[in-house]
Image (cartoon, rainbow, N blue to C red):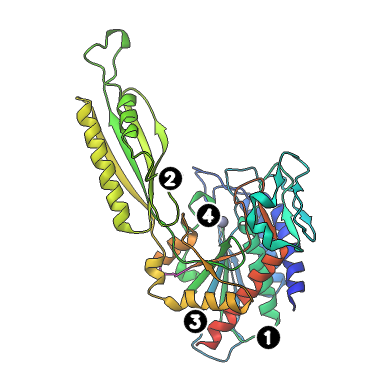
Amino acid sequence: MTDTAWKHRALERFLRYASIDTQSKEDSPTYPSTAKQFDLLRLLEGELRAIGLADVTLDEHGYLFATIPPTSGKKDVPTIGFLAHVDTSPEMSGSSVRPLVHPNYQGADIVLPDDPAMVLRLSENPALADQIGHDIVTASGTTLLGADNKAGVAAIVTAAEYLVTAREVPHGRIRIGFTPDEEVGAGTRFFDVSRFGATYAYTMDGESRGELESESFAADAMTFTFKGFNTHPGYAKGRMINAIKVAADFIGRLPKGALSPETTEAYEGYVHPYVLNASVEKTSVKLLIRDFEEAGLHDKEALLESLAAETVRAWPGSSCESKIEESYRNMKRVLDQHPHVVEYAREAIRRSGLTVTERPIRGGTDGSRLSFMGLPTPNIFAGEHNFHSRLEWVSAEDMAKAVEVIVNLARIWEERS
Ligand SMILES: [Zn+2]
């Protein structure tokens, strides 16, 4: 099969997957967070069986696993896995998505018809400069597209179809997995690493062609609960302690011009207040803590503790309790122990005729958690752009390159074993 065939197959699949609503939901009592994610999972289950994959299973949590049986005679080729998530972000509507193909892009503005105020411009999207002549897919203006991560799903299914039929490509056993609820930070909650049965894996959920990500943030969440004293405001003199004012004072003490999402980039970490539950008696402030190093997390947490203590001293009679919850850790700590996982991905990208670009992820992926669950999992591009936005786009050519990288990885693992 050629690049062109991969392009058409991946595009045809992507258009079908994108039109299915799979939006996940924050704070849902169920898992997966929304039942509609099964609409796509069941369709994929049928498709994986139809293309001839083995051991196709979809469990009650919404994990769809399947096997590409080995073609290599070598006995010691490790099982590798490819993963993508089926859900789309709760931040933007994902219902009645109308994916539109703009063939042979030449750099002109792309106006999205259902809301002409939505215009995809080359000047605002430098990555479009690499897409001249390509087929660009966008949504129609009122929803996200869901290229995050259905571009990855389409690439994996297309690569699986090729590998299961092209017996001449020597490769070991390969597992593929489609998962729910990544966008609400719960994609790995019930992921059974031993049942998945791969030794190493790759998520196909990155941005521009050629990108490889093997470093993520380390992340904690912190909650400070300030307690005051409430009484009738008409008779409160000398008695009331307003916890809202105490919490506001604490927030006012956070560093200005530094250590925040709006003032940091690259390898800089931050603290980020993002939820306030306020009443006079009790006000809690939730903060995200981010750094690439765990020591950096701990420094920031200690700083916040000391600012909270200062605040309480300034408001006699108030008190404060704090709580730290671990969110995820930098996958690099695990991947550094298995350098060939990332090295083979670089090689696969280069063999696909691309330049490798690596940068730290200022966030986490399912791979950040999986790496610490015993499945080292860096992230590879699927061509996704403008995540969670009405201006989301992907090109068919980039999806075809992602297919090629998967096929090359399958080959390289066999060659080096
Ligand atoms: Zn994603």
Q: Mark 3 points at which residue?
A: 78
Mark 4, ligand 1, within 8 Å: the answer is yes
Determine whether, in the image, residue 60 is placed left or right of residue 254.
Answer: right
Please tell me which of labels 3 and 2 falls first in the chain.
3
Q: Indicate whether 114 appears above or below 402.
A: above
Q: Which residue is drawn at 23% across and 40% down?
A: 306
Q: Mark 4 points at which residue?
A: 182
Calculate the distance from the C-alpha at mark 3 to the C-alpha at mark 1: 18 Å
Q: Nearer the viewer, residue 66 or 341?
A: 341
**First to last magenta residue range:** 373-377
Q: Quadrant of residue 53?
A: bottom right
Please tell me which of labels 1 and 4 falls first in the chain.
1
Residue 181: % across, % down: 54, 53
Determine whether, in the image, residue 159 is placed left or right of residue 101.
Answer: left
Circle 3 packing at 10 Å, graded few (<14), some (14-19), many (20+), is: some
Q: Mark 2 points at which residue?
A: 263
Q: Residue furthest bottom?
A: 73
Calculate the distance from the C-alpha at mark 2 to the C-alpha at mark 4: 27 Å
Q: Mark 1 points at which residue?
A: 167
Asked which secondary structure carries label 2, the reply is helix
Q: Can residue 94 be seen in this view?
A: yes
Tell me whether the residue at label 3 lies in contact with that at label 1, contact meaning CB atoms closer than 8 angstroms.
Answer: no
